[in-house]
Image (spheres, rainbow, N blue to C red):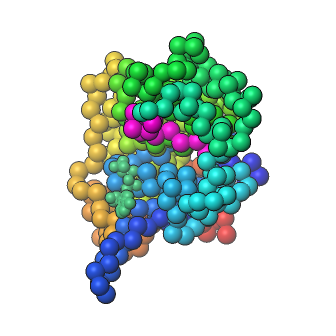
Amino acid sequence: MTDEALLSVSELRTWYELRKWGFFHAGYVKAVDGVSFDLARREAVTIVGESGSGKSTLAKTLLGLVPPTSGEMTIAGTKLDGEKKGKGLAWVRANVGFVQQDPYGALPPFMSVQRILGEPLEIHGVPKTDQEQRIREVLEEVRLIPYGDFIHKYPHMLSGGQQQRLVIARALVLEPKLIVADEPVSMLDASVRVEVLQLLRRIQEQHDLGVIYITHDLSTVRYFSEFAFVMYAAKLVEKAEVKELIHNPLHPYSQALLTAISDPDAANAHIIKEVPGGEPPSLVRPPSGCRFHPRCKHFMEGVCDVDEPPAFQPVAGHEVECWLYREGEVPVDEESA
Ligand code: ATP
Ligand code: SF4
């Protein structure tokens, strides 16, 4: 972890235990399985992967909603142990904002905008005299203005885009250090997606926030972050700067994802998203060796199905877990040892 690292995640594993039948134990769904990365202040990273790759579980683990099975997470120098209650969770609530996928489901229907934004301030002991000012500030930041038009409204009185702005306002109200946004625009109309992503980006830059943006749609990456990580079957198989990943994807899975991508811009909505053929693997009994090997057109028998590939760095700052890059390369872990 560097001095200025905001978030440091090391060898994180989150496994869900399957039901036991008497003495028979069916095992675990290994939804996050050895994930490591650092994020500096003012940096945004997109984590992209198909459905079931473990993205939401990673988000929930960072938010303290699911306890990690093993590994370490440190945010702004505070080590988190995935407590689901008590002081640890209160610290996470105050310092990590959460923007959910479905804004309508995320907002309590019988609470006004004022109560939705006031409640976290109340819980975290912000004096009553400061609460109104803070609510005004966040509503202005997310462009729910003028204040008087929105403060007494209920979620059902807002459009989808306005509801998501309110969710963002709630995530910001306690002035967090990090925002985790899990598919924040996937349920919005194409016409407002880019707008909401650009709003998040502007807020991130103004407040020096770290942002983890989780999506299954690689095309939205360029609207948002400096870095992109590709998640496949519970692992981060590729990490690079966004431009580098888009122009030079190294992992065969990333290459397949990038062959044709959708665009949230309505003008380009005709471009259809494609994912590589074949089924995503079981996370209870993942394939041996490289987890992508049953779907990979570069599969090398006796290599790819035997050992898990470590991270190689064939281009400076660009890591990939794939045996294609083993020639003359030293795995990243061994380099730093
Ligand atoms: P999606 O975009 O569809 O939500 P995802 O990439 O976010 O997919 P997760 O929701 O994290 O993936 O799910 C990863 C795996 O963990 C899936 O196989 C899922 O069925 C499983 N899973 C998620 N939650 C639980 C749970 N509470 N108990 C058992 N298995 C779970
Ligand atoms: Fe394909 Fe082998 Fe690379 Fe896995 S390690 S992505 S199977 S070439």
Residue 30, image quadrant: bottom left
| Up/down of 241 relative to 302, above or below | above
Range drawn in magenta: 96-108
Q: Looking at the image, which residue sits at the far left?
A: 278
Q: x, y percentage for residue 111?
A: 48, 32
Q: Residue at x 64, y 26 (%)?
A: 135
Q: Nearer the viewer, residue 148 or 39?
A: 148
Q: Residue at x 24, y 56 (%)?
A: 279
Q: Nearer the viewer, residue 39 or 145?
A: 145
Task: Inspect this view and state whether residue 312 appears.
Answer: no
Q: x, y percentage for residue 130?
A: 74, 29
Quarter of the image where the C terminus is located: bottom right
Task: Inspect this view and state whether residue 187 appears.
Answer: yes
Based on the picture, tell me whether residue 103 belongs to the magenta stretch. Answer: yes
Q: x, y percentage for residue 254?
A: 39, 47
* Image quarter for ligand 1: bottom left
Q: Residue at x 51, y 55 (%)?
A: 65
